[in-house]
Amino acid sequence: MACLYGNSIKAHISGLVSDVNTKDGAIWYKIQVEILDVYWFVERRYSDFEALNKKLVDSQGIPRDNVVLPPKKFIGNKDPEFVEKRRQQLDEYLKNVIQLLGQNPPEDLAQFLNLYDFEVIFMLRKLASEIFDKGEQILADQNAFTLSPYQIYAINERMKMPIPSLDSEDKRQDFSHIVEFCSRLQSLNIVGSNISLGSSTIVPNQYSMSLSIFKSIKFLSLKLINADKIAEVGTVRQTVERISIHNCDFQSMNQFLLCDSVYKTFAESGLSFSWNNVVSINCSNNTFESVGDIGDLVPSLRCIELSYNKLRNVFNLTSLPLLERVSYSGNVIASPEDLHLRFGNIVILDMSQNIVECLQPFYKLYSLVLLNLSCNKVSAVEQVKHVSFLPCLESLILTGNPVASSVDYRVKALSYFGNRASSLELDNEKANSTEMDQISIIQAIELAKRSTVQGKN
Amino acid sequence: MSGGPYNYSYIFKYIIIGDMGVGKSCLLHQFTEKKFMADCPHTIGVEFGTRIIEVCGQKIKLQIWDTAGQERFRAVTRSYYRGAAGALIIYDITRRSTYNHLSSWLTDARNLTNPNTVIFLIGNKSDLDGQRDVTYEEAKKFADENGLKFVEASAKTGENVEEAFLETAKKIYESIQDGSLDLNAAESGVQKKPTANGARSLSADNAEGRNPSSCSC
Ligand SMILES: Nc1nc2c(ncn2[C@@H]2O[C@H](COP(=O)(O)OP(=O)(O)O)[C@@H](O)[C@H]2O)c(=O)[nH]1
Ligand SMILES: [Mg+2]
């Protein structure tokens, strides 16, 4: 973490920016700024130094004897020897400025060194004034606000520093504004990154987060977050209602729900880690290999989205009494076990884009209204028979299965539904009158066949 | 940015101090949530609460820093005195030691806040009258001698909690009105709300600061 509290800045001009073309032919110096274990680069030209110097002369009363900017030169200022000499002089100048003002850098110096982008205290001053200006509106509109793990880490660390919440002249930069905003924010996006921030060596996902500053979160969204970097969930566990987790490296739902606990399963953790108000979890596009033992960790859950993971099985979610919508779309499920042993009374089940061949496991999902099995491997139309007795079923989707291109697919499939054939939507469409005629014929033949068989007996 | 519950004119910053266990966090919680939190976790470093109140017809947002009483957090606590417009010093009426430490808290507060900071003394846990260890009269005398406002309150029943926070705000507001508190001073602990375009406009602040309409309560 780059933080000026208790640490000092070092900066030196490490060289010239070599890609002259993009920089309109001027000489740009590459400055390496270093705080503690972190560094970053800033690119400045002579005129930037000059502008800085002017501001510092005005506001800070330099030059003192040892802090003098090398003079301007108009002709021959690109001569390599001159450039190198000037680099050394500017380096010397910079070192002197930092020695003089580096403990508590004035705004101009902080800007020159890009402290507002990377250094905790300055970064949070900038964030505070943004929040002061826009925060009330964001809260009033209940819009989401995005923070990175580095920012959240910085806020937590700042709380522990013995520095006044307002440490600049500008009251908009008061740290209180951030803490207040976080305590009232309802919708939070945390977006991580494994790539370093700008030109720095700061990798946001290396920083672990406590969410305890957030007191009112109802919607929590995590993107590209490292599973082991949520150190504390805090009150979010009680307040949050909807969660979405995408492109994170959690391997199971459990790992997320118990991310700040030493326990791995509900059996170990018990009720103290429950997320009582969560009604919906969207964990599409992760690398989940299982759901895990979630027991009563999310007792109010109604909707779970597990699409685009690496799931091979349908997991036991019978501990969720209110669950009604489930999506396993885009996984690698081939032949699930009997599904009525996996869910309670679910209403909508999306199993599209898996590799299911057989519909037998669905035959007792009596509460099901919508079953989406598009883009699976169902090839025999007889399979439809297994779901034809589901009493609430209103819509069945089989598009993109081999069966859907077989001869007379629609009429054959619908004919299994008996007198419900006319009301059922197959692939989002009810039977038209031609189809209904054909269905009646098939059903009549079936009936005839059966009575003949019975007659013979 | 008009309308809505968070339309306000000023931000006042408060700090709550006092020994550990006197009920600082509970008082804050009672004030912001109107609930007693019996099993309040120990405060590590600093905690925070906020609420909009109305004083003399003005909506005021309070930003309240709750501090940890323990010595090991003193450095963090101390840094939050600066820039506080109001300081609530709490003791526990059932524990004499917390009352005896008041002078040390008061010294800190006097030394580290600005001269305009309104300091309010609260004797908490007034619901535990049977276990009382400090009389009202004694504490009242201490408060008067030191020029502090004083009430006994209970974070549990809510008695006088609202009053203490509001009374403090009223005093602060009065010193803005009579000009003794300079809004623009960095450490005043008072701030005007953001202007519509988000830009800082000191001149507008000044113009309103000179507004002669005085507090009518
Ligand atoms: N009876 C009673 N107990 C209180 C009251 N306020 C706080 N407490 C209890 O006192 C203890 C310490 O409270 P806390 O707010 O954590 O103190 P802090 O260390 O000053 O923040 C907790 O067990 C509270 O339940 C009160 O007004 N009445
Ligand atoms: Mg506390």
Image (spheres, helix red, strand yellow):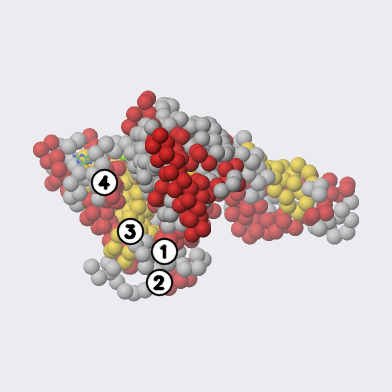
Query: Of the residues under marks 1 and 3, which one precedes in the sequence?
Result: 3
Q: Nearer the viewer, mark 2 or mark 3?
A: 3
The chain to which mark 4 is attached is B
- Amino acid carrying mark 2 in the image: Glu
Q: Is residue A71 above or below residue A2?
A: below
Where, quadrant-wise, is the C terminus of chain A in this rendering? top left
Q: Quote the CA–CA distance across marks 1 and 2.
A: 10 Å
Q: Say if residue B72 shows up in the picture.
A: no
- At label 3, counting other C-alpha atoms closer than 10 Å, the crowd grade (few under 14, some 14-19, many 20 or more) is some
Residue toward you, A246 or A378: A378
Are discs 2 and 3 located on one and the same chain?
Answer: yes
Return the x and y of residue A346 as percentages of the image width and height. Answer: 38, 42
Which residue bears the numbered disc 4? B27
Quarter of the rendering containing residue B213:
bottom left
Query: Of the residues under marks 1 and 2, which one precedes in the sequence?
Result: 1
**Regarding mark 4 in the picture, which secondary structure is present there?**
helix
The chain to which mark 1 is attached is B
Q: Nearer the viewer, mark 1 or mark 4?
A: 4
Q: Are the residues at dot 1 and dot 2 in contact (C-beta closer than 8 Å)?
A: yes
Ligand 1, seen in the image, is in the quarter at top left
Are discs 1 and 2 located on one and the same chain?
Answer: yes
Q: Give me the disc on residue B192.
A: 1
Q: Give me the disc on residue B52.
A: 3
Residue at image coords 63%, 53%: A111
Query: Does the closest atom of ligand 1 sit within 8 Å of the Cβ of label 4?
Result: yes
Give left or right: position of B80 versus A82.
left
Return the x and y of residue B35 as percentages of the image width and height. Answer: 24, 47
**Regarding mark 1 in the picture, which secondary structure is present there?**
strand
Q: In the current view of this chain or complex, which residue is farthest to the top?
A: A268
Which residue bears the numbered disc 2? B208
- At label 4, counting other C-alpha atoms closer than 10 Å, the crowd grade (few under 14, some 14-19, many 20 or more) is many
Q: In the current view of this chain or complex, which residue is farthest to the bottom?
A: B212
